[in-house]
Amino acid sequence: MANKPEYYGYEGPLLDKNFYCISSMKQKAAAEFNAWHDEQTSKGFVFNFRRELIDYCISDVTILRQACHAFRSLFEQTAGFDPMFNCMTLSSACMAAFRRNFLKPDTIGIVPPGGYHGRGKQSHIALKWLDYESHKLGRVISTIYTDREISVMGRRVDGYVEIPQLDGTVDKRIYQFHGCYWHHCPTHFPANEDSGENRYEKTQQLTSLFRRNGFTVVEKWECEFMSDLASDPDTKAYFEAHPTTRTPPLGLRDALAGGRTSALKWYYKADLAKGEKK
């Protein structure tokens, strides 16, 4: 309670017992404190606040340093790597130890950043919509599933097709599927002016850029397509007759089967006599 600027230069007898929060102590602790305080006062102990604060900080850091050193040594002996060099949190250290020492091969799918085929990322629902649009159009729309990457004017797009017209021109058509969260759907995720980012505005600017340069842009919001899947007869009939054969992306968290997944106990010694395994 005395850790305030007005006491930083204090030097003299021990401060009154009330400064040590004696009222919050248990009976045994309070009795021991009273005996210690009375003894120090009778001996004429001189309390130097600045020196005591410095000693406390040095002791605190020393204990933490020694504890960290012991933790690193024990962890490295047990798990085989330095947790403070490789990990940021206790949870990540435990997961790294599990992956390194206990995870059996071919039990969790870890998809490469570019996918197994070296393609970029594309949402499963977007590809599903593009399948339907390709069906309605009667021709193949180039997507990341048919080509490694689809770019127009140096910007990646979800789908693209060129359709020759009777007058000899070409309808250059871009397909854009807007995930509600990622593009700030005005219905479900209206932009927050305080966030400093307006994804909806950026989406509209890109669409305008394409149209100014002669492209036809077909857009679909995620919420609109989900509504079509649930209630539009033509959409429902198509996917009932043509179920998608693509497998949705694996979710690592799906491998965690219920219950608590945190490190409830930092160290546990297996009881081999009870049949527990290390």
Image (tube, rainbow, N blue to C red):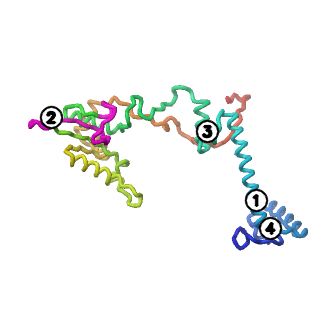
Percent x, y of residue 103: 57, 30
How many neighbours does mark 4 have within 10 angstroms: few (below 14), some (14-19), or many (20 or more)? some
Q: Which of marks 4 and 3 is in front?
A: 4
Name the residue rendered at 61%, 35% in the picture: 97
Percent x, y of residue 32: 84, 61
Residue that label 2 marks: 164
For marks 1 and 4 on the same chain, the one whose residue lies earlier in the sequence: 4
Amino acid at the residue labelled 2: Pro
Residue that label 3 marks: 94
| Rendered image: mark on residue 48 | 4
Q: Is the magenta stretch mostly helix, strand or loop?
A: loop
Whole-Å distance between the Cαs marked 4 and 2? 90 Å
Instruction: Magenta stretch: give its range.
Output: 143-169
Amino acid at the residue labelled 4: Asn
For marks 1 and 2 on the same chain, the one whose residue lies earlier in the sequence: 1
Name the residue rendered at 77%, 59% in the picture: 55
Q: Using the image, determine if residue 223 lies above or below residue 15.
A: above
| Rendered image: mark on residue 188 | none
Residues under numbered marks 3 and 2 in contact, where contact means CB atoms less than 8 Å apart: no
